[in-house]
Amino acid sequence: MASDPRAVAAAGPAVNTSGERPTIRIESAVKSFDGRVVVDVDELTLGKHPIEGLIGPNGAGKTTLLRMIMHSIKLDRGKVTLVEPGADGGKILSNLHPHAIAGLGVVKTNQVIQDFDNLTIWDSLLLSVAEASDERSYQIYREGGLLEEHQEDTRWYLDHFGFDDPTGFAKSAGEKKLLDIIRCLLLRPKVLLLDEPAAGLPDDVRDGVMELVREKATTENVSVVIVEHDLDVIWTMCDYVHFMAEGSVILRGAPEWIREHETVVEKYLGSGHVGG
Ligand SMILES: Nc1ncnc2c1ncn2[C@@H]1O[C@H](COP(=O)(O)OP(=O)(O)OP(=O)(O)O)[C@@H](O)[C@H]1O
Ligand SMILES: [Mg+2]
């Protein structure tokens, strides 16, 4: 157990933050399942740096925390706020429907992919984008403008990743994973939460995804948070890393500081915990 799970995470030396970015502020956020607290985060801001990592052993609560941000699960208590540069105050996400949260530009890929089985690649992408723009998602087929706007982007991503038949169905787990990432990029996110984006992707595809993610973060000011057990991705991609264990973020700092920290080595890196 972390010595004091409600304590603010110990921080390493400061890391340059390269200007104002959209951030997610999490305050006193608690979630339990069956009476067991699995997330208890007192104070955490994600997104001050272009690409941040959120790492920790299996069961640490990383996916649950991302789901709390998206409000796809209800918080027992606490508050999650989207704070955008130049905007007064922030938008409280923990009162909103997940679709509305995606509509505000906060989107998340899924660790376990469930969609894409019953729809063609093309339809599933268009529909998921429409769902975020308008809850009456069938409208996308009626409103030419919406369809056209997303078609061009959709085509670009499918070409870029070599999907030559979008009228077919996704075949492998890796293809579904990639489509889920494309779905999120199509939503033109301000904050992009990636839950194990590398799992199941061939190395070259993974590298292509990461290159695109880096570009979004640097040229479009998207704040990216990556949850990953593939630590090469974390150490090479991230400007800053949060370390989570037993429901709390207990350390935060530069990747090289986190990587060598004795708590991280003891709880995660050094004892065979790494792996999805
Ligand atoms: N819907 C649920 N019902 C009951 N328990 C759950 C549920 N979702 C998560 N848990 C439990 O909450 C804890 C945290 O799970 P979570 O999936 O957030 O961990 P994680 O850090 O994402 O782990 P991994 O690295 O293996 O993906 C685990 O003990 C898990 O079993
Ligand atoms: Mg997880």
Image (cartoon, helix red, strand yellow):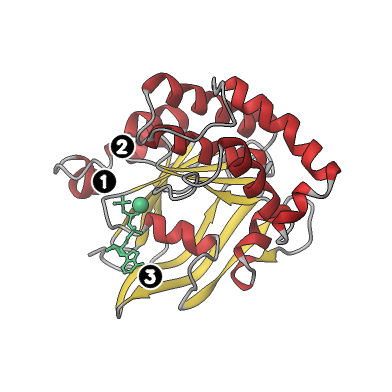
Relative depth, front residue between 234 and 126: 126
Numbered marks: total:
3
Pinpoint residue 201: horizontal percent, then vertical percent: 39, 29
Crowding at mark 2 (Cα within 10 Å: few <14, some 14-19, many 20+)? some
Relative depth, front residue between 103 and 157: 157
Q: Quadrant of ligand 1?
A: bottom left
Residue appearing at x 71%, y 31% in the figure: 153
Horizontal side of 140 relative to 49 (left or right) equals right
> Separation of disc 3 and disc 1 at Cα?
18 Å
> Separation of disc 1 and disc 2 at Cα?
7 Å
Q: Is residue 137 above or below residue 76?
A: above
Q: Disc 1 vs disc 2: Cβ atoms closer than 8 Å?
A: yes
Q: For the residue with label 2, is its CB less than 8 Å from the closest atom of ligand 1?
A: no
Residue appearing at x 71%, y 63% in the figure: 90
Q: For the residue with label 3, is its CB less than 8 Å from the closest atom of ligand 1?
A: no
Q: Which mark is residue 259?
A: 2
Q: Which mark is residue 264?
A: 1
* Secondary structure type for disc 1: helix
**Tag 2: residue type?**
Arg
> Separation of disc 3 and disc 2 at Cα?
23 Å
Residue appearing at x 46%, y 30% in the figure: 237
Q: Is residue 246 above or below residue 176?
A: below
For marks 3 and 1, the one nearer the N-term is 3
For marks 1 and 2, the one nearer the N-term is 2
Crowding at mark 1 (Cα within 10 Å: few <14, some 14-19, many 20+)? many
* Secondary structure type for disc 3: loop
Image quadrant in which you'd find residue 183: top right
Crowding at mark 3 (Cα within 10 Å: few <14, some 14-19, many 20+)? some
For marks 3 and 2, the one nearer the N-term is 3
Q: Disc 3 vs disc 2: Cβ atoms closer than 8 Å?
A: no
Provide the residue designation for mark 3.
6
